Image (tube, rainbow, N blue to C red):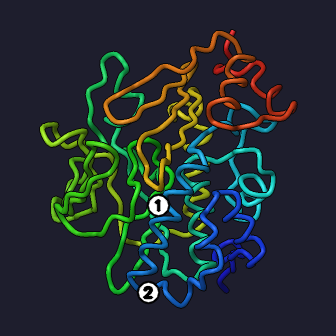
Amino acid sequence: MSRFNPAYRQTYTPSQIQQYFERVQLPKVYRDVVVATIADTQEGLAFLHVLLKHQLAYVPFENLELHYSSHHTIALDPQHLFYKVVARNTGRGGYCMENSTLFGTVLKSLGFDVVTVGAKVNEAVQPIAASPGWKGPVYDGWNHMLNIVTIAGTRYLVDVGFGSNGPTCPLPLAENRIVVNVGQQEMRLQYKGIPDLTQTSQKLWVYQFRNGADQPWLPSYAFSEMEFTPNDFAMMNHFTSTHRTSWFTYLVVCVKMVLEEGEIVGDITLFGNEVKKRVGDNSELLALCGSEEQRIAALEEFLHVKLDAAERNGIHGMITEIG
């Protein structure tokens, strides 16, 4: 007898969807759209693009739960994520599996055709690439989550959990179609084998970006079109959030995209003890934190993330604590 997992097909209520729209400050003109009637049309694609931009701008990519909490664990239940990100309204987000679970559940609730899949992240785009003696690139095991949305017969990559270099618009699953991402940054997909596979006939979609037309393409992650289940992500989440080789366990990160006049123009990133703002070719150091008090204050001032007393105390004794 098969065991039904209630998290597999969860959706949010209309009331919850309106709370989510308020949380991401979706323009009011979109809030009463009956999305199910347009989800399979170009109008639905345009709606998805707007919603994606607002998700990226108002729900940060962050791993604060692993450092600023009493439990230092990540839960992927959609109702828990709704409470954490939306209902509490404290500016919180999550890392890839949290944000993509939340966003995927929102899209399903609205009537979009969504499949959630796994990906392998290239070490070349992770902090480990800066380690002495690193000899990559090499792809990790399955450690990233994203959604594939089908609209009018075309499948689109939708990723709300890859930080500042992730796609900021739905990216069609088509080889070598170059799309402008943010500023001078471009992105594309290729369907190919990756060096880690012994059988070269096996192919995956590879998301790549470059920071200008004269720059080399950087493969970021490889993903399958095979649907992953909540049980698959439970296994992935356990490793990513607990294993000592996972950089999420020993570095603090919080990233929000900058939205101006309806367009993503850059990002604000807290990484370790620094907060930087990047717009176009300009990078500005906003804060250099010499203590936990300064980092907590910077999270609130620049990223609008408010940590309560229990969360602030959770960092004490952690390897990531400043001072």
User: What is the number of callouts on the image?
Assistant: 2
When the figure is inspected, residue 210 is found, relative to residue 174, above or below; the finding is: above
Label 2: few (<14), some or many (≥20) within 10 Å?
some
What's the residue at 70%, 38% (across, down)?
305
Q: In this view, does 295 lie to the left or right of 200?
A: right
Callout in the foreground (2, 1) = 2
Question: What x and y, as percent, mark residue 56?
Answer: 52, 52
| In the foreground, 56 or 301 | 301
Where does label 1 land, which residue?
146
In the image, residue 132 above or below residue 22 = above
Q: Is mark 1 on a helix, strand or loop?
A: strand
Q: Which mark is residue 40?
A: 2
Which is more N-terminal, label 1 or label 2? 2
Quarter occupied by the N terminus: bottom right
- Of 270 and 25, nearer the camera is 25
Q: Nearer the viewer, residue 250 or 263?
A: 263
Specify few, some or many for label 1: CA neighbours under 10 Å numbering under 14, 14-19, or 20 or more.
many
Q: In this view, does 224 lie above or below 91?
A: below
The residue positioned farthest toward the right in the image shown: 309
Q: Could you give the CA–CA distance between mark 2 and mark 1, rounded to whole angstroms?
A: 20 Å
